[in-house]
Image (cartoon, rainbow, N blue to C red):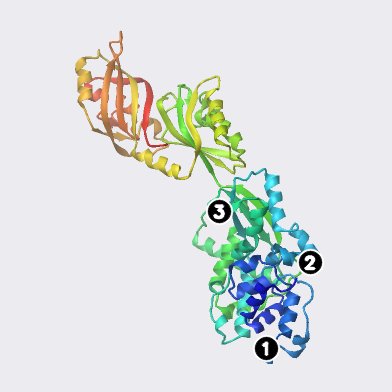
Amino acid sequence: MGFSDAVQELLATLPVHVVLELLRQEVCLLCIFRFLNVRDAVYSIDLPTSAEVYSKLLASNEYREEDPKRLKSSEVDASITGEPTCLICLGILQHLHPAVEAQSQAHEAREAFDRNAVSCILKAIKDGGHSLEGTFCLEVSLTALVLLRERGLWCYLKEQFKGEALFSGHDVNDHIVSLKEAVKWSLLERLENALPAKFDVGATLRIALVFKHQGSPEDVKFLAAASTGGDAKRKRHGQHEPESQGFAAVVAARGVTETGETLAAVQRCLASMNNELFMRRYQCPPTKVISACEITAVIWRNPVFVGGRYLKYSRNVSQSRWLIEEERMGQASVQEIIGDVVMPYYKADTYKFHAAGREDIDVRMLGTGRPFIIELLNARKIPSAEEMEKAQLDINGQKEGWVKVKGLRQVGIEVCSLMRQGEVEKQKEYVAVVWLDRPVTQGDFQRLSDMKELEIQQKTPVRVLHRRSPLIRPRTIHWMRCESIKGSGNYFLLHLCTQAGTYIKEFVHGDLGRTYPNVGSLLDCAADILQLDVVDVKMEFE
């Protein structure tokens, strides 16, 4: 590979003596650019080999004007041949870059990289059965060895070039280009063309490139000491790390990366050391490496959400799957009736069901329906609007007819927040069949209907004390309306609108005095509830 104008112009701006020293230390050209804080497009252009750059700089007038004491005479005459595995990135950038990769003589390393990262990603997408919908997000997981080696080389350069402003900083991370960013700059354009799809940090389809390396004996020794120290410290203080989320959790679960604890322990260990202490514990510059990193591509999709409203016509269907001592309660669940139909359309691993509140198993959900969201995990396909219509027809066409849905569609994650907010603020309308221990009178109807914005105090109902805190919760009954039932002197229909979270059954019968006032106390008689239906959940969910 020759020298393009862009490469020659770039090299002319760099300190030649530093570049030569880094080449002698078997640092690849792209990592040299990183350590000299070169950014952006250079990571994706065609580059000459390290040997070509070394030879050109040795022969250049610019170098001859440098102080000859910077390199020993025997080293000035030496030449770099081939493309050794980079001391710092452990071959990551070398074998991601198309020009350098094609010229590399490290055949074994190329095989470990499965030819290149793009083909590795394409294979992982195909093997996982994922489809592309125009966008993706690339994430990178690096071995903790990179942190050690970057720090080790930085300390060496600070000693080698004392007094030079370029290496005056203490923290290497503040002065060099992140390897993760360099990987993305090097790969993204080719990956976009190969998929084809566009990079978007907000895309649901996530591609993780995970790099692993066994390291040299010095690396392993340092890592072991750092990890042990981190574990011991936490055990002494009884602390626990929070669970990993998102990208870290996915790659860790698949066993393709170091534990998050290893990386965190190394970061803590490095942050606690000044450069002098680090140089006593770790060889600077780091030892040469023979083999390159192993690469693994992990593909998954962030949760995708499907929303709508459901109606439940059965009094023997629970909202979620309900088991008591491994025995199912009820005929089915809303969750399964809807989710088991939707999930295959997305080819997801599994799903979670969320709803704006819940009704008891013996309560019907009528009227406008209850808002719900299905959270689909690792969906491999995004169905079209026409397919979503078919999914709705599949649900509504089930012969039992226990559950129907309307407005089934894919929604954004912001709808989850909207639904949670609505759970607190919403009002709900009910109709109940109420029994009194005496004949119902028009005065009873008038008394209940006249009450507006009635505040009640509800202790946690006896029936849910096993799973809810024993508190007193104020709730508001916004209005009530009564309707007689022909031929039933002790029964009537009670229509009411209440604040979210009101226990309607307890408001009617009083729950042994734990809800007050209640229908019985208001009418000065015993009252009970025979049937209950939810007829409206007042909530913006469109």
Percent from the top left, x then y, of residue 503? 34, 31
Label 1 vs label 3: CA separation?
45 Å
Q: Residue at x 56, y 87 (%)?
A: 163
Q: Secondary structure at mark 2?
A: loop
Q: Which comes before the other along the chain, label 3 or label 2?
A: 2
- Which of these two is toward me, 3 or 92? 3
Q: Is 531 on the left or on the right of 510, as rendered? A: right
Decide if residue 177 is in sight here: yes
Q: Which comes before the other along the chain, label 1 or label 2?
A: 1
Disc number for residue 70:
1
- Which of these two is toward me, 19 or 363? 19
Q: Residue at x 55, y 50 (%)?
A: 203
State whether residue 290 is above or below residue 409. below
Of all residues, the one furthest to the top in this rendering is 487
Q: According to the image, label 3 marks what residue? A: 200
- Which of these two is toward me, 329 or 213? 213
State whether residue 407 is above or below residue 201. above
Quadrant placement of the C terminus: top left
Label 1 vs label 2: CA separation?
30 Å
Mark 1 packing: few (<14 Cα in 10 Å), some, or many (20+)? some
Q: Residue at x 64, y 49 (%)?
A: 299
State whether residue 94 is above or below residue 302. below
Q: Secondary structure at mark 3?
A: loop
Percent from the top left, x then y, of residue 23? 70, 78
Disc number for residue 106:
2
Type of amino acid at the residue the image marks with label 1: Arg
Mark 2 packing: few (<14 Cα in 10 Å), some, or many (20+)? some
Q: Which comes before the other along the chain, label 1 or label 3?
A: 1
Q: Is 294 on the left or on the right of 330, as rendered? A: right
State whether residue 185 is above or below residue 351. below
Q: Secondary structure at mark 1?
A: helix
Percent from the top left, x then y, of residue 353? 50, 36
